[in-house]
Image (tube, rainbow, N blue to C red):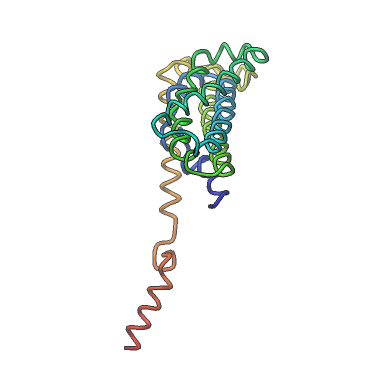
Amino acid sequence: MNYFRTFTKGLIKENPVLVMLLGTCPTLAVTTLAMNGLGMGAATTFVLVCSNVVISLLKNFIPKQVRLPSFIVIIAGFVTFVSFMLRSNFPELYEALGVFLSLITVNCIILGRAEMFASKNNVCASFLDGLGMGLGFTLALILIGAIREVLGSGTFFGLSIGDWFQPIGFFSSPAGGFFVFGCVIALVNVLSNYKMSSKKIGCASCPNASACGQAEKGEVAE
């Protein structure tokens, strides 16, 4: 298994938010501020990594009939731990995330990785998969949150960008969240399509080019 690819695929190529369009509810709800996006992303990453590792360790002991309920119980345990830690150490962030912190338990990103990857792969691969997907989720939330905060509040991570800019309240609203979310997805698609179109097309880029060449030589020899 290519562990480097397992880790990096979640950052851009299979980004859970911008490519796979998973976890859109917390993405739109908490990204009015970049710090909220960072907090939600960090909490989700912790739960994702820990649940992936535990599920990978227990995959041979969990009966198929209770697979999903068992996954939810494991995930809920880590979500509860994160909630207690944020409530005691970062009360303002805890209040800002609100109910969406508890809803990490049923986040389709975490359940999806548990079902599709952690339950079928070893601990190391599951750890890297969870870390990569979590970081991709976090980066997406920070990006969207930063754009909305700068345009909607005139601040960046709580620091004023200056009196020269007049904040646009629209970007702090739910409609503004959908607008920014759509623009970021469109930008990612444009960049992805440009990267694909810039690849060299022809026999040189084909993985079976050498086999084709040998076949042609054989036909010529006959």
Give the x, y percent position of residue 33.
Answer: 55, 19
Q: Position of residue 111 (x, y in %)?
A: 45, 30
> Is 157 above or below relative to 194?
above
User: Residue 135 at x, y = what percent?
Assistant: 56, 35
Residue 87 rendering spot, x and y as whole percentages: 62, 13
For this orientation, the residue located farthest to the right is 89
Q: Quadrant of residue 176?
A: top left
127 or 56: nearer the viewer: 56
Quadrant for residue 201, please give it: bottom left
| Residue at the (48%, 30%) spot, across then down | 110
Quick check: 121 above or below 98? below
Please tell me which residue is depicted at 39% across the width and 31% down the height of the picture: 65
Q: Nearer the viewer, residue 18 or 166?
A: 18
Quarter of the rendering occupied by the C terminus: bottom left
Q: Number of callouts in the render?
A: 0
Pick out the residue farthest to the bottom. Answer: 222
Q: Residue at x 50, y 41 (%)?
A: 12
Closer to us: 25 or 169 = 25
Taking depth in this image into account, of 6 and 15 the one nearest to the observer is: 6
